[in-house]
Structure formats: structure tokens, C-alpha cells
Image: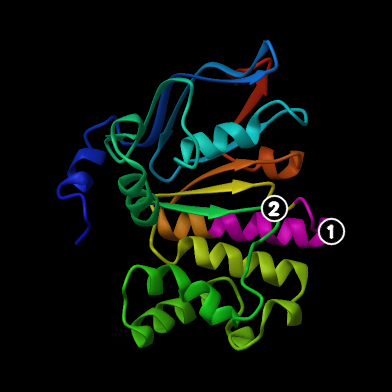
Amino acid sequence: MNNFGDLDDKMTNVNDSVISCSRVSKSYKQGSNTITVLDRVDLNIKAAERVAIVGTSGSGKTTLLNILGGLDLPTSGNVTVAGKNLNNINDSERGLLRNEYLGFVFQFHHLLGEFTAIENVAMPLFINGHPPKEAEASAEIMLTKVGLLNRLSHKPSELSGGERQRVAIARALVNSPKCVLLDEPTGNLDKFTAREIQSLLIDLNEIFDTSFILVTHDELMANSMHRKLILEGGTLHE
């Protein structure tokens, strides 16, 4: 049971969209100048779809990802997640929506160093009020899915870079989100480990029917998605 009533029903009625944005622009003031990072971007992400967003450094990829995830708001335009326009709800409601429907994986995994792998993965469930035993049982299942059953009690400092990223992916998926947003998930990994993470994401996408939106400079990763979109000059195109 979620906090948004019949949102699940709504999701299936918006052209099967998980996330969509319409004419989204983002600009910043720099002295007397206005810097436009995003210019009337349109995007529709369907259930179980894998989409890569590529572009040069500074092209606005992370800005777009943050706006899609409700971590930032556009200067103009609309973003809809699970049938809710993010412009029309407050910070608290956006937080609830993110916890219920979205997962996040960052280039720097942002694991909590003092906690074990299983505790890190269970953290979103702890925050949502799940009983500790139930939360850790779900975390163990997810860590098993990403191949880390033998690393449950290890802290991040005891894990390799690839293992830490697997923990971060497990944490992003433990709430059974409709969509996971990933910012350079292989950016700090060697080529072999990057291909392992690529294969893992494809497998998880097919197992859970979770949509993935990822920002990447990794062309092999981008080409393994259903769609590859290019962000340049503030606009997004195939």
C-alpha cells in the first residue's frame, strides 16, 4: 500500500509512462547573464525501458537526471512521475514519491562507511519504517541478486569498486522502484568491471521490469540500452 492512493492505476493510463517531461528548460543566472542548460526538452520513459543519455561534459546531463528524479525543479516545463506533476507537489510529497517510485545510483556510490553492505541496502526500508528483520531480509535477497551473498557483513572499505557499485544498485532496487536513475554508474570502474555492471543492469531490467535512465560517457554501455539519446546545445535528440 503506498501513500498516493491509486497512483499505480494512473501510471498505466499515461501511455504506460513511468517518467515524462514536457518542454523542460533550466537556466541559471551568472552575474547579468542567463545561462541556459536545458532548452524545452521532451522525454517519455516507458515501463521496463532502458535509456541512455550521452553528451559532452557540461552539456546538462546530470541536471536533466536530477530534474527527472525530482531532486531539482525546472525553470519552466513539466515533469510527471507516476501521474504526478512534480511542479504541483511540495518538497515532502516529492520526497515520498522518490522513495516509493524511484531509485538512484551515482558515480560515487555514496554508501555509508560505518554500515555493512546489508545495512546500506536496507537503509531505504529502515527510513520507510519497515521492521529491521524484514528490511534486512529484503536487502539480503537483493544483494544475492547482484552476486554479493558472501559480502553481506562487509563494510564499503572492505569491498572492491565494482562490489561497492553493486551494493549501490541493490540499494536503489530494494524498494522495487518503477525507475532507477543512474549517473555515470561505470565512470570510476575499470573496463572489465564496467562490462560486468552493464550485464548486471540488463539482467536486472529484465528480471524486475524496472526502467533505467542512465547518463554515461561509456559508449558500450549506452549502446546496450533500448534507446540512446544525445544532449547537446540544451536539446535532446535520438
Give me the residue at 45% from left, 60% from top.
Answer: 207
Q: Which residue is mark 1?
A: 190
Image height of 95 relative to 172, above or below:
above
Name the dominant secondary structure of the magenta segment.
helix
Q: Which residues are magenta?
A: 187-203
Q: Position of residue 189 (x, y in %)?
A: 79, 58
Q: Secondary structure at mark 1?
A: loop
Contact, mark 2 vs mark 1 (Cβ under 8 Å): no
Crowding around mark 1 (Cα neighbors within 10 Å: few <14, some 14 to 19, many 20+) is few
Furthest-front residue in this view: 31
Q: CA distance from mark 2 to mark 1?
A: 13 Å
Image height of 234 relative to 143, above or below:
above
Q: Position of residue 154 (x, y in %)?
A: 66, 85
Dot 2 or dot 1, earlier in sequence: 2
Label 2 vs label 1, nearer the camera: 2
Q: Nearer the viewer, residue 176 or 205?
A: 176
Q: Position of residue 27 (x, y in %)?
A: 58, 19
Q: Secondary structure at mark 2?
A: loop
What type is the residue that disc 1 sits on?
Answer: Asp
Crowding around mark 2 (Cα neighbors within 10 Å: few <14, some 14 to 19, many 20+) is some
Q: Is residue 152 left or right of residue 172?
A: right
Q: Quadrant of residue 197?
A: bottom right
Per the rendering, the mark at residue 79 is: none
Give me the residue at 76% from left, 39% from top.
Answer: 217
Per the rendering, the mark at residue 107 is: 2
Q: Nearer the viewer, residue 147 or 80?
A: 80
| Residue 126 is one of the magenta-drawn residues | no
Q: Is residue 181 left or right of residue 222?
A: left
What type is the residue that disc 2 sits on?
Answer: Gln
Q: Nearer the viewer, residue 36 or 154?
A: 36
